[in-house]
Amino acid sequence: MEKILIPDKLNIDANSYRFLAKLQYDIYSCTDTDIELDFSKCGFTHSAFTAYFGTLLSISKLWNKNVSISTGNNISIYNYFRCSGIYDYYQKTTGNINNNAIPFTNFTDDDDKLMQYIDNILHHAPIFLSDDCRKMLFKNIYEIFVNALEHSHSSSGVFSCGHWMPNKQQLIFSVCDAGVGIPQLVKQKFPDIDSVGAIEWALQRGNSTQQLTAGVPRGLGLADLKDFTELNTGSLIIFSNNVYYNCSEKTAKIPMRYAIAGTLITIIIIADYEHVYMLKEEKT
């Protein structure tokens, strides 16, 4: 069995994303079929990455690899994974998820399940929303999932996980697929664009690799979520193919040496109980 040691800290920074990209490469290229991700020395892993680790466990089977998570005596990391829903999902158990979790889940084509899941995300959101703003956020988050399901061509579906972090007063959730990836999709339309430019193109309002589907305008989800997280002083982070792109940090638009399959999108919402979030047209 091949053991891969997880670093002592994985946070929202370029080095952590570089590690995650190389981790996927190491799993894919490993000559052993059994691989253990060893978290025994890991003191902290950001909840933004839970969906990514859960996705790795699934897609590794497509590479004829059996990947497992080991925490040793690291009780805090074990409890976090157990409470997040990864344990229940892969061990086929129930009852381990805590009330702060938006449980680790896989989506394929169950629209009712997806809408209930997004309701749960917004239920955990530590902010006051007007009815119209809530509908807009619901639609934007829904578009992120639908785009991943329809356009990523991921054979394993789309995974998601989140957590309300009371000590940090933050809601963090991620959507992850192991499909084509945003840069590769955009480059199919614009071959001369680089990977960072492809992410920036996808963040522009109205831009979509499918501009109109069944009469429904596309390309609003990422742009609206970017605007919302800026207003909230939260974060929208896109990790796709060989790019780490943090919309809240001007210097965090970084090409990576190793590319991942697909896309990991993370949204961080900061607790704000002093304001009501409304649409611009509601304020006039």
Image (cartoon, helix red, strand yellow):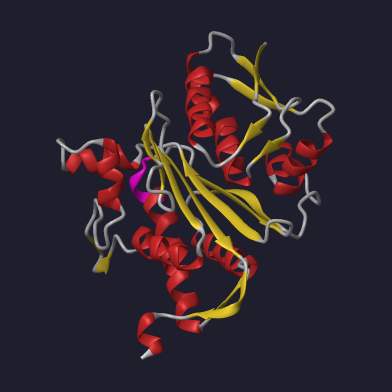
At 41% across and 42% down in the image, what residue appears? 252
The N terminus sits in image quarter: top right
Res 140 → quadrant: bottom left
At 77% across and 55% down in the image, what residue appears? 98
Please determine whether, in this image, residue 243 is positioned above or below residue 141: above
Any magenta on residue 222?
no
Res 263 → quadrant: top left
Please determine whether, in this image, residue 38 is positioned above or below residue 265: above
Counting from the top left corner in percent of width and height, residue 185 is at: 27, 41
Counting from the top left corner in percent of width and height, residue 244 is at: 41, 38
At 52% across and 38% down in the image, what residue appears? 13
Please tell me which residue lies in front, 272 or 144.
272
Looking at the image, residue 39 sits to the left or right of residue 115; the answer is right
Q: Which residues are magenta?
A: 149-153
Counting from the top left corner in percent of width and height, residue 83 is at: 76, 48
At 59% across and 35% down in the image, what residue appears? 53
Q: In the displayed image of the protein, which residue is found farthest to the front? A: 251
Any magenta on residue 151?
yes
Looking at the image, residue 264 sits to the left or right of residue 205; the answer is right
Looking at the image, residue 214 sits to the left or right of residue 78; the answer is left
Please determine whether, in this image, residue 281 is positioned above or below residue 237: below
What type of secondary structure mainly makes up the magenta span? helix
Please tell me which residue lies in front, 43 or 109.
43
Counting from the top left corner in percent of width and height, residue 215 is at: 24, 69
